[in-house]
Image: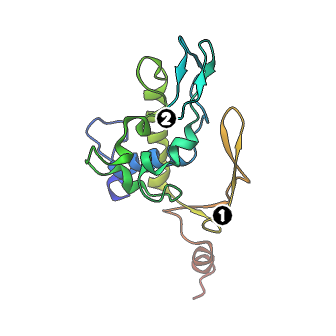
Amino acid sequence: TAGVRGAQPYSRDVKLPYMEAVFRECHRLTPVVPMLSTRYLEKDIVLPSGYEIPADTAMCMLTLPRAKDPEFVGDEPEVFKPERYLTKNKACPSQHRFNKEPFGYGARLCLGKRAAELEVRCLLVALIRRYEILATPPNQPYEKEFTPVVTPRPFPKIQVRRLDAEPVAAAMTAASGSS
């Protein structure tokens, strides 16, 4: 967080690779949208398994199975590990281009991608500068509820403490003049 505290999150000069890796890992494990847009097949296809799919069939790509597949993300797909995105090794499974694009890819890329990423970056940097945010208790279990967006249930409990605020007990002691 040291690089975050004095940085302007919207500056092109700011490089926060670990924060970017955290974003990608969060999107991988809990994608906002559980499937990408529907497309219709233009012609009949046969999958490698031999399963035949006729033309005009509606198809959509589910994001979670790919996000949990070691072929696409490497070892320990169930573990939150942002470091998997810090490597420059193009052969690393986590470097696959579809693992970096929770907003879609190519001609169907979400028009709001840049605005959404900038907004989240600015919000996160502002929060990290001012607050300590802890899950209480840590490692809370939750299930993913699949609606038009993926939502954790129950929503994790957190504790937020302002970084420049004195602890309440110390402030009360100082105000009363006792030691």
Q: Which residue is pictured at 56% across the width and 28% down the height? A: 36
Quadrant of image for the C terminus: bottom right
Figure quadrant of residue 141: bottom right
Residue ID at (36%, 49%): 85
Q: Amino acid at mark 2?
A: Pro
Label 2 secondary element: loop
Q: Residue at x 61, y 65 (%)?
A: 139
Q: Residue at x 37, y 56 (%)?
A: 83
Of residues 6 and 64, the one drawn nearer to the viewer in this rendering = 64
How busy is the neighbourhood of tag 2: few (under 14 within 10 Å), some, or many (20 plus)? many
Relative to 80, say whether 26 is above or below.
Answer: above
The alpha-carbon separation of the residues under discs 2 and 1 comes to 25 Å
Q: Are marks 2 and 1 in contact (CB under 8 Å)?
A: no
* Mark 1, other Cα within 10 Å: few <14 / some 14–19 / many ≥20: few
The picture quadrant where one finds residue 2 is bottom left
**Residue that mark 2 sits on:** 102
Q: Which residue is mark 1?
A: 140
Q: Quadrant of the N terminus?
A: bottom left
Q: Is residue 55 shown above or below 115?
A: above
x and y percent of residue 146 in the render? 70, 40
- Residue 49 is left or right of residue 117, and the answer is right
Q: In the displayed structure, does residue 14 sit left or right of residue 73?
A: left
Q: Is residue 135 visible?
A: yes
Q: Secondary structure at mark 1?
A: loop
Q: Vertical placement of 156 versus 178: above or below?
A: above
Q: Position of residue 98 (x, y in %)?
A: 42, 35
Say which label, 2 or 1, has the lower sequence index: 2
What amino acid is found at the position of numbered circle 1 in the picture? Gln
